[in-house]
Image (cartoon, helix red, strand yellow):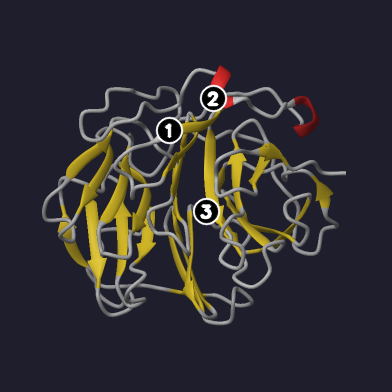
Amino acid sequence: MSRGTKRRRPQSRQTPQQTQRAAPAKRRSLLYVGAAAAVLVMAGIVALTVFSSGGGRGDQPSAGLPDTPDYHSLLVDPSDPQKLVLGTHTGLYVSSDGGRHWRFDTLSGDDAMNLARPGGDTVWLAGHDVFKKSIDGGATWSDVRPAGLPSLDIHGFAVDPRNPSVLYAAVAGQGLFRSSDGGRVFSLASAQVGGGVMALAVLRDGSILAGDMQQGLLESPDGGASWQQRLRAQLMGLAVNPSDPNRLLATGRGIALSTDGGRTWRSVLDLADGAGPVAWSQSNPKLAYAVGLNKTFYRSDDGGKSWHVVRGY
């Protein structure tokens, strides 16, 4: 993919009320079960949807997902699963009712491609030419200007769950970079993987999962020195369950679930327009949310096995 941007395609403005709950058993599968030999290629999910610009801070909440360019990232409050943060091309939106209503919050103009909250009140934000950190749960933000990164065009970002000082940043067109000092200095972890990565996650055993737009879903057990292909698929999002590290969600041409740490996958929701940001609830690990690129917000209450539309009223 081209450096620092995504191809966009026009899309009809479908409302949540027009989208029916999927019946995965009757639909075309998103992903075939398999590991490195998987052969499915999910096409067309190179770009996120383009919408009109959102409002400013303090706007009244509006029903359904906000009208804003590009839904990029999603974060669930660690203590309240109804409180959500949505990262977009133009800043952060928040919901206090599980995604039924949203309002613009802060960071107008910042492209929030990645949000990560490794623990406590620390929150990371990384994206197109933006790298920020909050130490008060997102109330205030400061710029991060580390040494060692070739640019701040960070398309993928993840924190090692074993050590919050270990960060990984996938820099567009460059590779995967690692910091062991909380983001002050980064060094190259892999030049072969990272430049096309849009989805990044670190498992509790230290393995790195990288959704590369050209190479598929890759796994490294050794900090990026070597990689194995787990799935040939274009992915937009990855999420690791907070209580069961073997339970993973991946988004691309819909939503897929793995219960064995990413070695095998099955489709749980097939979406013609695709899906983007996906996140688990830490306080309720059976609960997960995902953003459909048809401007529809989805929720699972059974550990990612089934999904239904969150309707804004």
Q: Nearer the viewer, residue 210 or 169?
A: 210
Q: Contact (CB < 8 A) between labels 2 and 1?
A: no
Q: Contact (CB < 8 A) between labels 3 and 1?
A: no
Q: Position of residue 182 (x, y in %)?
A: 33, 78
- Residue beneath label 3, please? 111
Q: Earlier in the sequence, mark 3 or mark 1?
A: 3
Report which quarter residue 11 is drawn in: top right
Q: Residue at x 73, y 55 (%)?
A: 98
Secondary structure category for the residue under label 2: loop
- Quadrant assignment for the N terminus: top left
Q: Position of residue 3 (x, y in %)?
A: 33, 41
The disc at residue 266 is: 1
Question: Which residue type carries mark 3?
Answer: Asp
Q: Nearer the viewer, mark 3 or mark 1?
A: 1
Q: Nearer the viewer, mark 2 or mark 1?
A: 1
Q: Nearer the viewer, residue 58 or 99?
A: 99
Asked if 212 appears above or below 178 in the picture, the reply is: above
21 left or right of 247?
A: right
* Other residues around mark 3 within 10 Å, as few (<14) / some (14–19) / many (≥20): many
CA–CA distance between discs 3 and 1? Answer: 31 Å
174 left or right of 267?
A: left
Q: Earlier in the sequence, mark 2 or mark 1?
A: 2
Question: Which residue type carries mark 1?
Answer: Arg
Asked if residue 153 can be seen in this view, the reply is: no
9 left or right of 171?
A: right
CA–CA distance between discs 3 and 2? Answer: 18 Å
